[in-house]
Amino acid sequence: MNDALFLHRIHFAFTITFHYLFPQLTMGLAPLIVVLKTLAIRTGNEAYDESVRFWTKIFGINFALGVVTGIPMEFQFGTNWAQFSRLTGGVIGQPLAMEGTFSFFLESAFLGLFLYGEKRLGKWGHWWAGFLVFLGSWISGFFIIVADAWMQHPVAYTRLSNGGFSVSSFWGLLTNPWGLIQYAHNMSGAVVTGAFVMAGVGAFYLLQQKFVEHARIFLRVGVVAGIAASLWQVFPSGDLHGKYMARNQPVTTAAMEGLFKSQTGAPIVILGQPDEEHQRIDNPIIANKVLSFLVYGTTTAEVQGLNAFPKDQWPTNIPLLYFSYHVMVGLGTIFVAVMALAAFLLWRRKLYVSPWMLWVILLCVPFPYIANTAGWLTAEVGRQPWLVYGLLRTNQGYSTNVIAGNSMFTLLGYMGLYLVLGILFLFLIQREIGQGPALPGAGDVRAGAPITRT
Amino acid sequence: MEPVWFVLVAVMIIAYVVLDGFDLGAGVLHLLIARTEEERVTVIRTIGSVWDGNEVWLIAGGGTLYFAFPLLYASSFSGFYLPLNIVLWLLVLRGIGIEFRMHIENHLWRSLFDGFFAISSALLAIFFGAALGNVVRGVPLGADHFFFEPLWTNLRPGADTGILDWYTCGAAALALVALIVHGALYVALKTEGAVNEKSRKLARRLQPLLIVLTALGVPVTAVVRPRTMHNFREYPLAYVIPLAVAVSLAAMWTFERQAREKAAFLSSCAYIVAMLAGVAVALYPSLLPSSGDPARDITIYNAATGEYALRVGLIWWALGMGLAFGYFVFVYRMFRGKVRPEEGHGY
């Protein structure tokens, strides 16, 4: 517990995990709000405008928390991972600086206009403000993925005489194949969260017979976006990601799948607990030859197991990696099933009158958050024992001049602060959902206008 | 390429201090002069649409520093571990204070968030001042260019320094006063009526103190770290900077008394730019000087990343900054003029 490396790792893991609860909704909700705004302009139906205002308020609260929990991230590379920063700044620093200059300036300039400028801007001006905020949030996501992808799959770098890494090809870094695949996978993951939250709030209202017209809009938009994003999540983005990973981090794939021994016609483990000590899966439910097929397109191919690699290359926490991956994949599959069923009912015009389906959608709301978190855990735990895959080990990257006690102190500080932030967030969000999509003219919280419908 | 990036990073930091500086100052004023709910809303609305964008300069500046001078980023952020984390917590509280206060119409709720906003703003001004003081004074860099400073030791700027000693506390006081004046002039520019009068009065009252602290700053700095005078002796042209400081202070004083609000605020901007430019000149080519052996200084040469990265960086940096400049002009034009209560909605 008092090991400095361990504390620095938990420090980063905790702050980034908490932070990413917010941007995933920001990035997922932004395109859906643009869709709602487009529908509002095209149909002239006031219910769409009210829906936009409602989701804009949720978006604003969520965005604020994303910003304030994001600021520490930009600095934490330096505070807790100084050796890593010293060595990799010439590469990682570039996407981070570009995120600031190309995304955050854009977002911050148009966010205020988007949140509070509906009257001032007119309908198309407001549409553009929303679109630019959406664009900014997706650009931001791209640069973060570029940074992470370089750590997963370093490309386009040279070594300097002082041991550091520096970019050797600007486009090579930005078009890292790992990054493009990861971006495709990550962004649809965010849309899944946005879609389930929107549809879930719709289901919540409809089950209570409140705001019925708005609830139907939320369900319609949420379910259509949800089925598209959750399918994309599995295929092609998830499939490509898995294949690319198996070729570039085969030992990670072996650990994720719980494949201890190399075999031809390797099976896929659907359920079961990895037992590291005995090198086997307990109470397994497996599908024969499926892993070989998924990775190499043929049921007879050989997939390398953990035994094909020296132990010092193995991911350091195999059970965590295995469970994160299985939770992600399991939930991803469930999302497809839920959204497909909901989309079918929507098509048959039965969704709004099927309380059981509304219940399922409502209860599903927390799970995309879990799946996104598990997905990131898979990526980052799977990269271990490396900080930069094959180049820099995690135990070479932390701040050796920051003692464990100081890391403990600030970790506790962040935990306390974020607990308060989390409570505030839930309180404000439940308040907005309780008030619901307001009547025309009553939608502005800032003005302190009374909300007539409660 | 390295000197160019020294200038670019300096420009970003200066832009941050000038822009977020008036936000922080307005935050401190918030409790000092705004008493009623209406006055407080007015103060918040002067910065409401711009504070987030202003703070992006800190993030973008941090990212740029990380990219161009990785060693500086790594060494200073880990060496200033405790104060930097406290700064981050304060930034969190301040952001929450501004964004969440309006969500609930209840005076206890609003007072709580007003408190977060004002106190964290004041502490941030103090911490930023102390940080700058540390950079000017130098830090105990080891042979590997790393260091770690506790919050304080014996409060003396000797060999075994802490973040706070009498010199850096002085820098903190100067920063606090300068940013309150800066914020007051900004709030005056953006408001009418009681808030305008009270903030102008506060600016007038603090100006003599600001002049005294500024005038004390130069000789004291020369004593604490004589090397800061080196560039000024080598290039006497650099004395134009202290001259600019004096002129901008005089202009601030005069314009304020003539009720020329915009000119007074711009003078305050010029004062901050000149002060920080003076610091940059005093440091160059060091980025973070050693309080001991000068050979251990982190300089633009031992901290910079590769030549290609810096060269290509110039292109995207210029493009990104061009866009950012465009957004800023757009936003400040959208919200130009005085904040008027009858506009009602939002900012």
Image: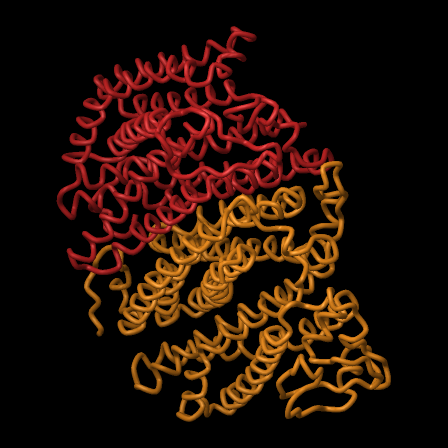
Chain colours: A orange, B red
- When the figure is inspected, residue A272 is found, relative to residue B114, above or below; the finding is below
Q: In the image, residue B172 lies at what x, y percent?
A: 34, 30
For the image shown, how many numbered marks are present on the structure? 0
Q: Tell me which residue sits at (76%, 42%) in the image.
A: A159
Res. A134 visible in picture: no
Q: In the image, residue B184 lies at what x, y percent?
A: 25, 31
- Please tell me which residue lies in front, B266 or B241: B241
Q: Quadrant of residue A101?
A: top right
Q: In the image, residue B274 lies at what x, y percent?
A: 43, 20
- Please tell me which residue lies in front, A425 or A431: A425
Q: Tell me which residue sits at (30%, 31%) in the image.
A: B176
- Please tell me which residue lies in front, A159 or A349: A159
Res. A318 visible in picture: yes
- When the figure is inspected, residue B14 is found, relative to residue B55, above or below; the finding is above
Q: Tell me which residue sits at (16%, 46%) in the image.
A: B38
Q: In the image, residue A127 lies at what x, y percent?
A: 45, 57
Quarter of the picture containing the C terminus of chain A is bottom left
